[in-house]
Amino acid sequence: MEKEYKARLKDELSFYDTSFLKFLIGYESWYMGNYIRFLRYSEYYEFSKPTLLNRLLGGVSKIVMRWFSRKTGFQIGLHSCDWGIRIYHWGPIIINSHAKVGKNLTISPCCTIGRVGKFYPIIGDNCTLCQGAKVVGNVHVGRNVTIANNSVVTKDVADNCVVGGIPAKIIKKS
């Protein structure tokens, strides 16, 4: 792996405790961190030089990622999220592989970022999806947006605001 890629991965995994001791006691951060690790490995090997070793490592990392997916409930599409994803708890998290999510996404359980028909959402940098939030369809969510608990975003959201409700409306704009 490239040094830059390894450095970014190390920085992203610093949020999770993936030590062997945490594995022994069944700490959930170990599972979440390793899911992210193998997600990034799968992404890396998918577009790396197509040698036999890279294909083998890519296949193994996808199998391991799927095992962690069943364990944690996460289904994050390859290449859908930029660096810095933070997941705070186990639970169903679905991010469609066609969605585009910016850097530093903070996401809670029971969140869905999905497409409707041929349309998929685009989410900016530094966004937070609170528990149960849904972003579906042809939606553009700006930067620094917080989506409140159990909100359903079906229309575009401007930068630097808090949205909530079904359908989501701007609660606070800063």
Image (cartoon, rainbow, N blue to C red):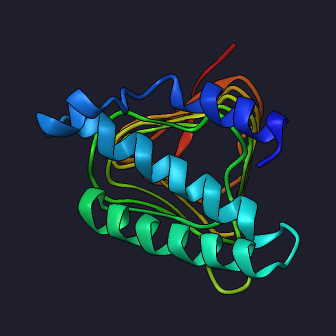
Q: Nearer the viewer, residue 110 or 56?
A: 56
Write down the quadrant of residue 50 in the picture: bottom right
Instruction: Single out the residue that lies furthest toward the front.
Output: 53
Which percent across, then down, holds residue 91?
Answer: 27, 52
Percent x, y of residue 135: 55, 57
Front residue of this view, candidates 80 and 59: 59
Q: Residue at x 63, y 57 (%)?
A: 41
- In screen coordinates, is 91 left or right of 111? left
> Residue lying farthest left?
25
Q: Position of residue 155 (x, y in %)?
A: 67, 55
On screen, 168 above or below 100?
A: above
What is the quadrant of the C terminus in the image? top right
Vertical position of residue 108 compared to residue 21: above or below:
below
Residue 66 pos. (x, y %): 41, 71
| Residue sitting at x 34%, y 49% | 132
Q: How many marks?
A: 0
Q: Residue at x 71, y 74 (%)?
A: 53
The residue furthest top is 174
Which quadrant holds residue 48? Answer: bottom right
